Amino acid sequence: MTHCTHTPGFVLLMVLVVLAVAGSLLGVSARRTGEAVLEAGVAARELQRTWAMRSLQAGCLPRAEAILLARAPEDGPAPATVWTTVRLGETPFDVVVSDEQAKANVNLLAAARGRAAVRASVSRLSDGRWPLQVLLRPVVQASGAIHTPPRVYASLEQVFASASPADLLGDDADRRGPSERVTCWGSGRVHVRRAGRPVLRETLQETLTEAQLARLVTLREEMPEADIETLLRELELKEAEAAAVRARLVETSTCHSLWLVARGRTRRWFRLTVEEQGDAANDAGRWTFVW
């Protein structure tokens, strides 16, 4: 008969092995639980951010024109862009509503003058304020949508090299990016009361001299309620000249945009939506870009 005797040292070793294995399993379980909690938190915040942006878009974009008009001074036109900040939950959101027809349309410029002239116009519009290289990348759109002028630029990323959304929008209302003056959407006709002088200059370059442009800007300041026909009569243009200017101006806008920027602790999320109403020369459309 053989007797097997377990020494205390062996028993202690087995206990240590069991404890080590159990500790390892507990560590793995704790790590996986922690990762799951973190992932759940990230997913919850992402869901909240997504629905917050959708809610802001549903509330602001259909009312874009009303929002602009609400910021109009008593003796002047509504601004082309309105910046504001709202807080939903723990996240602040920048909300930027714009009239796209108060901006210079690169598709119109391209159709009228060609690529080299577009590059020069965009550079002049920047006034040296935008640290972005103009790099034009036109693309013929394959969709069956009708648009005049032809939309060969469907995004500002086709106009500027290595353009981040922060570069395009700007940091805030005091340091705005190229989206303040340049657009790819709308009919190309600019709002006669809202467009800034640089935008009017680039849009009406072939139709008005610098002196006539200065006179137009002065007239609209002196007569803020005047319509296009009244302004043209005051300019005393020839009929052909008046017709050319009339074809580039509008009094009401049918294309608006909404930038939404969610500001997190370490990064920002951007969403741009552009909505264009249809008319006799253009199909309606909506474009959304997410970064």
Image (cartoon, grey):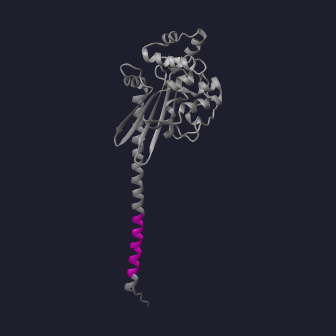
Q: Answer yes or no: is residue 29 visible.
A: yes
Is residue 267 placed above or below 152 in the rendered structure?
Answer: below
Dominant SS of magenta comes to: helix
Between 117 and 157, the residue placed more toward the observer is: 117
Decide if residue 3 is on the left or right side of residue 105. Answer: left
- Image quadrant holding the N terminus, namely bottom left
Which region shows up in magenta? 11-27
Is residue 100 placed above or below 45 in the rendered structure?
Answer: above
Q: Answer yes or no: is residue 154 visible.
A: no
Decide if residue 217 is on the left or right side of residue 133. Answer: left
Q: Residue at x 53, y 19 (%)?
A: 213
Is residue 76 placed above or below 290 in the rendered structure?
Answer: above
270 in the magenta segment: no
- Displayed quadrant of residue 210: top right
Report x, y in % for residue 168: 51, 37
Report x, y in % for residue 35: 42, 56
Decide if residue 150 is on the left or right side of residue 264. Answer: right
Q: Residue at x 43, y 15 (%)?
A: 222
